[in-house]
Image (cartoon, rainbow, N blue to C red):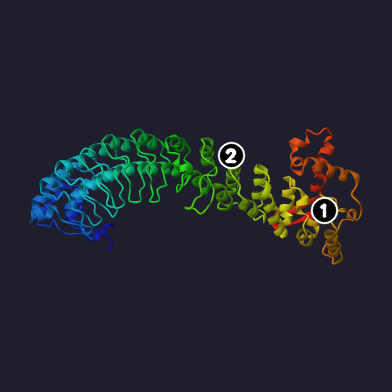
Amino acid sequence: MMFTECYQDTCSVVALAVRRGECRLLQRLLRKGHSVDVKDNRGWNALHEAAAGGHAQCVRLLLSASDSYEDYVNSLTHNSETPLYFAAKNGHLRAARRLIRAGADLNKMSNDLSSPLFAAVDSGHKEVVELLVSEGAEVNGTHFISGWSCLHQAVYKDHTEIVKFLVSVCSLEAVDDYGITPLFVAAQYGHHQCLEMLANAGANVNCQAKDMATPLLIAAQEGHLSCVELLLAHKADPNLYCNEDQWQLPIHAAAQFSRISILEKLIPVTDRECDRGKGKVSPVYLAVLSGQAESLRPLLREGYSPDAQSCREFGYCCPLDMALWCNSWSVGSDFHQSREITKMLLANGACVSLATYILTLQGHVPEHLSLILEYCGLPKGEQLEALVQAAVNKVAHASFWLPLLLKAGLDPLLLLQQKMLEEAESRVLNFFLEFINWKTLPSTLLHILSQRRAENTWTPHKHFESVPDLTHLCRLAVRATVGSDALSKPSFVRQLPVPTLLQDYLQFSDISSAYTFTASANRESPN
């Protein structure tokens, strides 16, 4: 049977008369001896109906006609609601007053742990709240499964007038089952007026929930700028750690959820130990992890390091590695965000480790290597030697990495290794040979080419049978003089006193345009 829906056939004639507020009819029924305590399917009797409808005169008549005055005024429904509960919930001041005078229990809890005062607060009936409090209702009792107080509920519902009254009579530091205070609730839901009243009344702005979250953290997370400003004005501590590992701060929440205005407020007041401090986690990581390019921009602009610190918490040695391998690089907005984040980190000087260079050689995400080379170029010295060796060991992916490394200024002579010539796919080998003098190779390498041709694992272009023409030999001589790295830079080449056509030729543009490589398949096909 339902305890919330009323079945008409279970209602007494007295209850029906009271529901309509018909006092004269009620009087006639009472004179005829009709019972006032017949209950319907919900457990409601006539007094519940009178209280819920605000029929104060009916309340008086029913109380006078009851056999047991004190028991009747506190009669319970199947959900343990009293008549006073309904009068308070529906804001019926006169009915509530009559019930209280008759001895109604001010603090009787319903099955869902709601008292008359809590019900009045929840519904926003300030005058009833004031009445109940003045008559001695318990103001700091806990209600509902969460254990909220009346002040919690008033703040949650943003009933500012009731909050204004309750802050003078309630405990400001009452906590629910999660250690959350009313002020925390105000910050969480962005109820600025309630937050201001609580802070002005002396509530602790640095209180912490059981999970160590602070009002400033939750306000930042939820994007309530005015609440953040108010909390800071009342000395909320932006450097109070909000997790057991002692690294999470409000600035991290602002970065993670792209609360830009809040982030800009927090950057100047947050201790920079979080930037690169050992055992900490830079907010840069949170911006990268959540794919928030807009959050990353002000952090880098205000001097946060693009390299941060090695992050044990997330398992990455730097934000760039997180950007490259954590975020989605699929098509659509996620791709755009990930690319933008990577570009920002590189443009702001993020260091690229040798391991990162090597990981990008396989081309799982083609954008990675091209972006790194665009912003950082090739590594130097021993790291370059290691990269070349790693590339040769991944010769199966050469259709991806070879064009990119050569365009970035890698000296192709560094790739003249036995493994490269033995294992490179036929068309990749042809492309590679275009960048050198194929007729002056060491005899061991010429023998490899001859053997592959005999085995039909390499199909050379016809011009490889002849000595390279003079123009090609000349550009090889220029490259030998100025270096591959210099020739890879358009700014350098454009300064050379030769026609534009020759400038393009010096950069091997004729070769690059003759081949089209499909990075996703790690294969190329000629135009």
Q: Crowdedness of circle 1 by 10 Å Cα count: few (<14), some, many (20+)?
A: some
Residue 29 seen in this snapshot: no
Q: CA distance from mark 2 to mark 1?
A: 37 Å
Q: Pick the residue in front: 106 or 277.
A: 277
Residue type at numbered disc 2: Asn
Q: Which residue is mark 1?
A: 433
- Residue occupying image coordinates x 87% and y 66%: 454
Residue 358 seen in this snapshot: yes
- Residue 161 point in image, percent of width and height: 27, 36
- Residue 51 point in image, percent of width and height: 19, 48
**Residue 236 placement, left or right of 66:** right
- Residue occupying image coordinates x 49% and y 50%: 311
Earlier residue among tags 2 and 1:
2
**Residue 72 placement, left or right of 264:** left
Q: Secondary structure at mark 1?
A: helix
Q: Pick the residue in front: 430 or 47.
A: 430
Q: From what the image shows, is residue 73 above or below residue 216?
A: below
Q: Residue furthest bottom?
A: 455
**Residue 483 placement, left or right of 464:** left
Q: Residue furthest right?
A: 466
Q: Crowdedness of circle 2 by 10 Å Cα count: few (<14), some, many (20+)?
A: some
Q: Secondary structure at mark 2?
A: loop
- Residue occupying image coordinates x 76% and y 55%: 524
Classify residue 233 by image quadrant. Answer: top left
- Residue 223 point in image, percent of width and height: 43, 41
- Residue 401 point in image, percent of width and height: 71, 53
Q: Are marks 2 and 1 in contact (CB under 8 Å)?
A: no
Residue type at numbered disc 1: Leu
Which quadrant would the N terminus be assigned to in this image?
Answer: bottom left
Classify residue 457 by image quadrant. Answer: bottom right
Q: Pick the residue in front: 280 or 461.
A: 280
Q: Which residue is mark 2?
A: 348
